[in-house]
Image: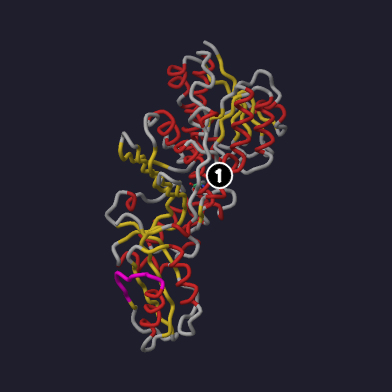
Amino acid sequence: MRSINIGLLGFGTVGAGMVKILIENGPLIESRLGALLILKKIADLDITTDRGVAIQPDILTTDASEVLNDPEIDIVVELIGGYEPARSFVLQAIANGKHIVTANKALLAKHGNEIFAAAGKQGVEVAFEASVGGGIPLIHSIKEGLVANRVKMLFGILNGTANYILSKMTDEGTSFETALKRAQEKGYAEADPTFDVEGIDTAHKLAILMMLSFGIPINLDAVYTEGISKITPLDIEFIQQFGYRIKLLAIAKDTGDAVEARVHPTMIPAGSMLANVNGSFNALSITGDMAGDILLFGRGAGMMPTGSAVVSDLVDIGRNILYGAVGRVPAIGCQAGAVRDRRIKKIDDLETKYYFRFTAVDSPGVLSKIGGVLGAHRISIESVQQKGRVTSGSVPIVMITHKAREVDVQNALKEIDSLPVVQGETILIRIEGD
Ligand code: HSE
């Protein structure tokens, strides 16, 4: 049987998952591919820690060039994460004629245009199923299953850590810190967990999906990004009372004249499907102009789900090598010459419903002062709640608005937060799906 040789850069959680799958499901994968996938070399700075997987010790090296420059290696799997040295290694591997499999969404979101161009010139594949949605085949679904569609909308949960934290805070009253610690122990979180909690990881993933869905270059800077670190247990209590759940959502829409792209904590009706996607699970709703709405759901992070996505890319490339069909499915989803830049809307242009939590002095006339500013900025209130009196002298006042424009909301909140009766910054959460 023919062999396809693999070199691995970065032997962490996902790398160990990939190796475990290649061992445990080896015969099954070979029967589907029609070739052996041979792990020839693993490079990592740490080659002593036991990853719990059986490998020949002599395939381990601390020198990445042993992978990059080995003429027998067909596919380099980059699981180092981060920007450097991952970028240099990937470009070097491409220059050496090797195909690339990567789970590195940060790398692709920042340097993807450069990497895809280099791979295109060199005639090698870049596959990245594991970069978005862990074990859910989101990339294959968009590139192949939905190839006949113009994607009109992407709407979903793309970060397991943030979803795990919000689910634990909502359902078990766990503190933010404890939930984050648990997510880190389970291997969901990024090396720098601020990427998870500040929405950056979700934005990386959305930028990649937008490239595939809308045929545009990757443009991370245009994705409005806000994280979950300001969400308090008090907000979660109010959100539930209003009949919603809170999720860190990635939202992209093709509005015809432009593209909308944003990542932020979002209140969605408690009975909706996405509201019930909890823990480390991810889900992405894709609206195609022909297929309609599709919902893909599964484990968005972790060793085995992400390892499964890596192996699916190895098989894909392996099949193309075997059949002389390298480049059969373009890495970026469309032919390079068909990529078009589109205008990406500013968040100021958004029109949606909002939740506000004001912290205000508990005295007569306060509500009308706040209401007056909102009215002056064309913001209409749908409902209001004030929690009982508290001894500290300030009370939370919570409002849900009708649809309003973001620019008006931001201007109104600036004015409200400078009122002497308002103490502390107002919390704003956007609402979708009503
Ligand atoms: N840190 C990421 C998450 C890992 O929590 O979803 C998967 O990309």
- Residue visible at 40% across and 61% down? 430
The residue singled out by tag 1 in the image is 219
Residue stretch in magenta: 377-385
Q: How is the image coloured?
A: secondary structure
Residue 168 figure quarter: bottom left
Residue 370, x across and y down, in percent? 40, 79
Q: Is residue 85 left or right of residue 147?
A: right
Residue 172, x across and y down, in percent? 37, 61
Residue 294 figure quarter: top left
Residue 198 higher or lower than 389, as above or below = above
Residue 89 higher or lower than 387, as above or below = above
Residue 312 visible in the snapshot: yes
- Residue visible at 61% across and 27% down? 119
Task: Name the secondary structure under disc 1.
Answer: loop
Q: Residue furthest left?
A: 271
Q: Residues within 10 Å of mark 1 (few under 14, many from 20)?
A: many
Please identify the quadrant where the C terminus is shown.
bottom left
Residue 358: say if magenta: no
Residue 379: say if magenta: yes
Residue 107 higher or lower than 407, as above or below = above
